[in-house]
Amino acid sequence: MAKIFAKQRLSASQLRMVAERRYGDAAYLEQSGENARANGVFYLAGFVIECLLKARLLEQYPSVAKLAAPEALSASDRVVWMLINRSHDLDEMLGYMPDLERKLVAADRIEGKGLLRKLKSICAEWSIFARYSPRSETMRAASGFLSDVKELRPWLKP
């Protein structure tokens, strides 16, 4: 069996490394220009955001990061543990990061790029179910999505 299939809990730095690798994969697919690769760009780009949000949660909730099982946690920390280890719900993850929202609002006041709007849109729209979709998107749409992810990446790091 290939080592990449091993189940393991990742640290925040490992999640960021994975995010960078998947961003590179998405960018490589985008460079092909082939509409047949657009769904892959969407999926991988959204996964980048998922990894970066989970890394932030791990840093924001260090007590949650240390546990392999949620039984010993408070009810609220158990929810965070589930978001990190069992969920792909970006909207719900973002709900546990008011500091990130404040940071993006402040940046938007200065830079006017709509960063929070872009992040909320990605979090509301993206889903792991994209990997099962029989529908196809265009590379033009995928490129716009990837561009938003590229712009957000530095803001999602500490």
Image (cartoon, helix red, strand yellow):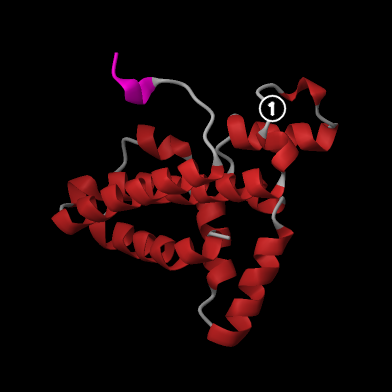
58 or 136, which lies in front? Answer: 58
Percent coordinates x, y for residue 20 in the rendering = 37, 51
Percent coordinates x, y for residue 95 in the rendering = 70, 52
Query: Magenta region: which residues?
Result: 1-5
Q: Please name the residue shown 18% across and 58% down the image.
A: 31
Percent coordinates x, y for residue 94 in the rendering = 64, 52
Say if the magenta span includes residue 59: no
Q: Is residue 133 above or below residue 147?
A: above
In the displayed structure image, the side of residue 22 where residue 100 appears, left or right: right
Percent coordinates x, y for residue 112 in the rendering = 54, 83
In this view, the residue farthest toward the right is 74
In the displayed structure image, the side of residue 83 where residue 140 appears, left or right: left
23 or 157, which lies in front? Answer: 157
Hey, what amino acid is under mark 1? Leu
36 or 23, which lies in front? Answer: 23
In the displayed structure image, the side of residue 100 where residue 15 appears, left or right: left
Q: Is residue 104 above or below residue 131?
A: below
Q: Please name the residue shown 44% across and 45% down the image.
A: 47
For the C terminus, which image quadrant?
bottom right
Which residue carries the number 1 mark?
A: 67
In this view, the residue farthest toward the bottom is 110
Secondary element under disc 1, as helix, strand or loop, is: loop
For the N terminus, which image quadrant?
top left
Q: Please name the residue shown 70% across and 49% down the image.
A: 60
Say if the magenta span includes residue 2: yes
Image label count: 1
Residue 102 visible in the snapshot: yes
